[in-house]
Amino acid sequence: MTLSLIAAVSDDGFISTGKGVPWDLPDDRAHFRQYTAGGFLLVGRTTYQEMIGWFTDHRPIILSRDHAFRPEPGHHRVPTVPLALLYAQQEKAQELIVCGGAQTYAAAMPLANKLIVTRVHDRLGEGIAFPPIDPQRWIETSRIEHPADSCHAHAMTFLTYQSQPQRRRRA
Ligand SMILES: NC(=O)c1ccc[n+]([C@@H]2O[C@H](COP(=O)([O-])OP(=O)(O)OC[C@H]3O[C@@H](n4cnc5c(N)ncnc54)[C@H](OP(=O)(O)O)[C@@H]3O)[C@@H](O)[C@H]2O)c1
């Protein structure tokens, strides 16, 4: 089972100013929608509440310690990342895609084996950060450049990384 993290991250490592995703980048939205289509998605409770109404054919799993929290019908709450993986496995998922936010990325990163990162060539200076991408553990496997244009205020780089557990053990 693949555990992936998908995120848009500024050059200085932020995913949000604290008031939501700060960029309007249609081709990144399309990339996110295409990658996640029909997928099992792990979403932190804060991000889930921002995304209500966005889900269509997805299978959202919400990370929350709050036993009283009731997601939308058909969506599922879990209190830990390992229980999210177990649930997805039981549901015959091939991949669980972690869609944020920062606390959820941080909780899932140690167990993940794939990162799908849109590096947005902008600097926020401060905000909510993506966990550091350890070069001893993660190897870049694909890179596509996207220039700024009339619809995109910032250039972007679409990156994929795979986890290298053997490298991590030798380090
Ligand atoms: N740029 C991007 O790609 C991107 C993607 C997604 C989100 N974002 C942004 O990220 C921000 C939200 O991030 P965030 O870090 O504040 O919130 P978050 O990760 O979306 O949700 C936090 C909540 O998830 C639950 N949680 C977190 N870690 C947990 C753990 N280890 N075990 C059990 N439950 C856990 C807790 O819910 P309870 O309090 O209910 O226990 C916690 O309050 C928003 O601004 C959003 O727009 C950006």
Image (cartoon, grey):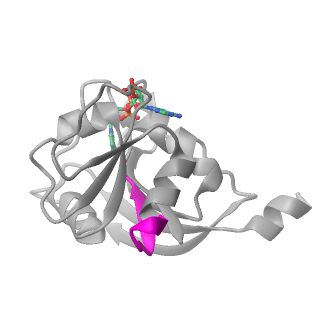
Image quarter of the C terminus: bottom right
Q: Nearer the viewer, residue 49 or 144?
A: 49
Q: Residue at x 29, y 37 (%)?
A: 47
- The correct choice, above or below, for 37 with respect to 77 in the image is below
Q: Is residue 5 visible?
A: yes
Report if residue 40 lies within the magenta region: no
Q: Nearer the viewer, residue 68 or 48?
A: 68
Q: Residue at x 20, y 58 (%)?
A: 29
Q: Is residue 21 visible?
A: no
Ligand 1 sits in quadrant: top left
Residue 60, image x and y in percent?
Answer: 28, 53
Q: Nearer the viewer, residue 120 or 107?
A: 107
Q: Which residues are magenta?
A: 89-99
Q: Nearer the viewer, residue 155 or 106?
A: 106
Q: Residue at x 34, y 56 (%)?
A: 41
Left or right: 142 in relation to 136: left
Left or right: 111 in relation to 20: right
Residue 4, image x and y in percent?
Answer: 48, 62
Left or right: 57 in relation to 44: left
